[in-house]
Amino acid sequence: MAIEIIFTANKEPEMQNFDEIIEREGTHCYKYDLRKKIFGVDDVYPMWVADTDFRAPDFITDALRKRLDHGIFGYTFLDDEYFSSIINWIRIQHGFKIKKEWIKYSPGVVPSLFASVLAFTEPNDKVIVQTPVYFPFYTAVKETGRQLVRNPLVLRDGRYEMDLNNLKSKIDAQTKMIILCSPHNPTGNVWRKQELLDLCAVCLENDIMIISDEIHADIIYQGNKHIPSASLSDEISKNTLTLMAPSKTFNIAGLNSSYVFSSNPDILDKFSRYVEGLHIGANIFAIEATKAAYMHGKEWLSNLIGYYTDTIEMAREYIHSNLKNIDLIEPEGTFLLWVDFRKTNLSRDEMLKLLVDSAKLGLSDGFMFGKEGDGFQRMNIGCPRQKVLEALERIKSIKSFRA
Ligand SMILES: Cc1ncc(COP(=O)(O)O)c(C=O)c1O
């Protein structure tokens, strides 16, 4: 059945004020209310977990309110509009035409990572991850009894690159899957077409399935373009399961709304045994939020990217003028800054003591993304710019970091 095109112009009447400071403490919020658990103290300035301090756009809260006002929250299902909103978003934002029958709901990208490893590999099979990388990539492999194969990214002239020669040398008959992070958390890479083509060619040659985590696909900075791995060729598409969500972009991670897609029905069937097979259905509010985000979010998103771009410019300039031995890896996408402290020659413990105990700053320690992240810190800039400035000033408050 043909899906009706329902994409409409942004309904947002005014530009959202991203400078607005909204209190999040006491709202069962990871970033603020779990500081003691993560940092040992509850008064660090929180710039860690990857959600944002921005209010979700009005067109999402209006849609949720409308649903709430109905007052009945019985069993529900994914309607055509849910699928067409996803199809249109991916076509308009990323230039890729997908079909309704390629899409499956999932409560989250991390659950999809685990489900994928379970569905497409056997115990002891080898799964490749390119490090440093978002830490659930490791747990999805290790906690399911598979073997982790690291293919460290190489930092060359300020930009991370994939090391395909190293990758090839590690592949053997037991290597069954790669989990690709595209765009890459924490390094901020937006992989270029040729990089993806080269990687996918190695995967196809060696019968390695691609799990492409594209949750950060919407936040892309000028001069870069997100290319869905599955859009590269029909052959690659048939070998790929793509994981996406509106959660990072629109700050709705707590609503548990994500989805996967593949043009290969066998892949979808196997994946479905885990999510549909366990009868994990979508929540009414997740469905409404996804539809609203994707039907009305285009202009809001471009304002958000503009805001992030200015924040990054401010941070770049601040680091350059005020700090020493600290370098910013230029982000091509994501709202995560990967900051290189290696020239400070401090050990991890010394670094954490200074940042957490002295500066009272809660960044994500690079080691958490794998040993290749040691000496780096990840700063979440998904917040009013004033907070990013405060975080930078806290770094500057450490005498040995001051220029
Ligand atoms: C690369 C990547 N994948 C997945 C997630 C989380 O996905 P979800 O909240 O849908 O499980 C994150 C969150 O930071 C992420 O950076």
Image (tube, rainbow, N blue to C red):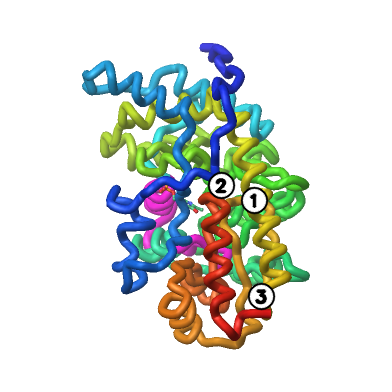
Residue 199 sits in which quadrant? bottom right
Amino acid under disc 2: His
Q: Is residue 26 left or right of residue 79?
A: left
Q: What segment carries the magenta color?
A: 109-135
User: Residue shown at 65%/28% (left/top)?
Assistant: 92
Task: Determine if the C-beta at disc 2 is less than 8 A from ligand 1.
Answer: yes
Cα gap from disc 2 to disc 3, whole angstroms = 29 Å
Quick check: is 113 in the magenta stretch? Answer: yes
Number of the front mark, 2 or 3? 3
Q: Are the residues tagged 2 and 3 within 8 Å (C-beta)?
A: no
- Determine the secondary structure under disc 3: loop
Work out which quarter of the rendered image holds the C terminus and state it.
bottom right
Q: Is residue 385 above or below residue 340?
A: above
Identify the residue position indicated by label 2 in the image. 216
Earlier residue among tags 1 and 3: 3
Residue 171 sits in which quadrant? bottom right
Amino acid under disc 3: Leu
Q: Is residue 213 above or below residue 42?
A: above
Earlier residue among tags 2 and 1: 2
User: Residue shown at 55%/87% (left/top)?
Assistant: 346
Q: Is residue 280 above or below residue 284?
A: below
Residue placed most toward the observer, 23 or 353:
23
Identify the residue position indicated by label 1 in the image. 333
Q: Which dot marks residue 323?
A: 3
Cα gap from disc 2 to disc 1, whole angstroms = 8 Å
